[in-house]
Image (cartoon, rainbow, N blue to C red):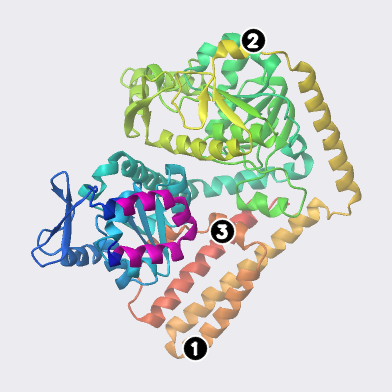
Amino acid sequence: MNSIWNKNIGLFRKRFPALASMLEEQVQAFEKKLEGNASLPLQVIQAKDGNPTASENGAMLHSKYNPLREATLQISSFNAEEESSALFFSCGLGYAPITFCKTHPSVPAIIIEENAEYLMQAMSVLDWESVLTHAAISLLVGADLDSVASVLHQYDMKKAHVFSVPAQMSHSADYFKNIHLVIEQDKSKDETNTATLEKFARLWLSNTCRNIRKLDELDGILKYSGLGKDIPFVVIAAGPSLSRVLPNLAKIKEKAILVCVDSALRSCLDAGVEPDFIVLVDPQYACAMHLEFLSAPSSVLITEVAAWPSVFRFDCKEKVLCSSMYPPGQYFESRMEQKGKLGAGGSVATTAWDFARFCGAGEIFIVGMDLGYPGRQTHIRGSQFEEREHRLSSRLYTSEYQSVSALLSANPVILKDYRGADILSDKKMSLFSWWFEKNCAAAMEQGVKSYSLTEESLAIKGIQSFPLEEFLERPSKLSEKESFFGMAAVRGCQSKDLAASGGRSSFNELIKGFIKSIEELLEMAAKGISLCDKAISNRLKAPEVFAQLDKIDSFIMKSETKEAAALVFPTERRLKELSSDLPDDKTLRSLYYSRIIYRELKKACQDYLEFFSSF
């Protein structure tokens, strides 16, 4: 046994005892290969400079001449000022991570390797002490995609530097390709969230302020929590495959609780079925249009306080709220009875699925959640999306043209459905798919199983295909459903009685307190602007002004409404744009930047006071 291996495996066992225990059998098998000079994955040879280098299947993994210098050049691409972590997708013999850990002893580094034998061979050739004693090293060895994603989500992928050499990854090319996809999805999600915030913040604020009293008037979904353990739930989405299920929807309703997304409601009603629940949580007017001219007197509408105001005029049995995803609603709910939080994965179908899980369902069946375009269709016939295409169509802008544009405008890819057939999907759909993979896996650990009743839908790991015909043979659950709604009604009454007797502050008092706090923030912002102007015009005043600004900042950070004001405060990206041409002088730059912050805070407070002016 060589001394380098003995040293490295000793350090490895000390630093990663749990991982070492998991890999112990593989370690022993590798040591037998070392002792017997058996063949290993990599062919190790000597480079021109005398250091070891390696190849695999004829492809060099490192330089033939100077692998250490090559690694140093590779690591020099890491920008410590802008990047906060380093990812190594495999690493050959380990020159790059070894050099990185020596150069950046405190920067988080993650080494990802699917095949443990490759890592072991590397540790039998080079001294890995700098890696195995690094302050912030993570080794993901033999980890599945979900585990890798779980670890990577703890880091800011926008600031992560990925070191990936194709030859070093060739033994697990598909594995690393999928990890690249996870990283891109994570970056896309952050970018999408930022763009959405910039575009819709004022809409969310406007809707919340106009609907704010609904928080006091309506029950929350909390009254349904855990009541559905003995009943299957069926989530109805508006994909093209829903059309195959609609003729059987009435029978399905007898055997399960139907949770319908807003965009699928018209199709359900056209089939003569009112779902048990309708979910609409997107604040946009276009989503409110899904309910336009419709009614469902026996359905319960699940929405949130930031929804478009017309949603609350929808004709249905009852309207209930889930917890708001936006700061104004969160501020008031934190001082009232909780409504019940649902997950948000970018699609109303994710919220509908999470409501079924919230109710305690042991089985969740999904129909019409295609996450792709089976038959090159974007939505079920007759949906609001298709009707809109017809309304907007013209001789030069036909509905067919609009459909083709939708199919081709979002980076289309060909994937597989539950039959193994090709299905056209896109990058946006892959984000939703990833949300379901992650959350269905977590739910499965808790005994919650998810199935798809439409085999034409995109196959998602963690959601199994289930024959519709077999589901239709299941027994009726009408009595269990009656009990479900009966117990929820009792809970709702008990909650109202408790609130009435609990001495909770009146809702009007909460609003008055909120407005007063916003006015105080506005006053501090105006004072901050004045102080910055004072120091900018007279640099001698800067020390005195900075001391006063510290007090203002302390007041703002302690304000109960600062998070609510943050909703209409500029994003980090927008602040960079606003401060792109500030003076180079450090003192002036700080003053100008502070003034920008106070000005934007002042605007945010004024927005709130404008919307709350009627109270």
The residue tagged 2 is 473
Instruction: Say if residue 548 shows up in the picture.
Output: yes
Q: Which mark is residue 407?
A: none
Please report whichever mark, 2 or 1, sits nearer to the chain's N-terminal start: 2
Q: What kind of element bears circle 1?
A: helix
> Looking at the picture, how far across and down is residue 222, in whole percent?
74, 40
Task: Specify whether residue 284 is in view.
Answer: no
Q: Position of residue 451 (x, y in %)?
A: 55, 25
Q: Give the distance between the C-alpha atoms of the residues marked 3 and 2, in whole angstroms.
A: 52 Å
Q: CA distance from mark 2 to mark 1?
A: 79 Å
- Identify residue type, mark 3: Ala
Q: Say which quarter of the image contains residue 373.
A: top left
Whichever of labels 3 and 2 marks the residue nearer the N terminus, that label is: 2
Q: Residue at x 62, y 21 (%)?
A: 293
**Residue 495, how many percent across, how many down?**
84, 42
The residue that appears at 83% across and 30% down in the rendered structure is: 487
Q: Are marks 3 and 2 in contact (CB under 8 Å)?
A: no
Q: Which residue is mark 1?
A: 543
Residue 502 among magenta residues:
no
Judged from this view, the residue extending furthest toward the bottom is: 540
Q: Which residue is mark 3?
A: 566
| Looking at the image, residue 170 lies above or below residue 488 | below
Segment colored magenta? 5-32
Camera-side mark, 2 or 1: 2
Instruction: Tell me the residue at 45%/77% (across/down).
Output: 591
- Magenta segment, prevailing SS (helix, strand or loop): helix
* Depth order, front residue of 451/19: 19
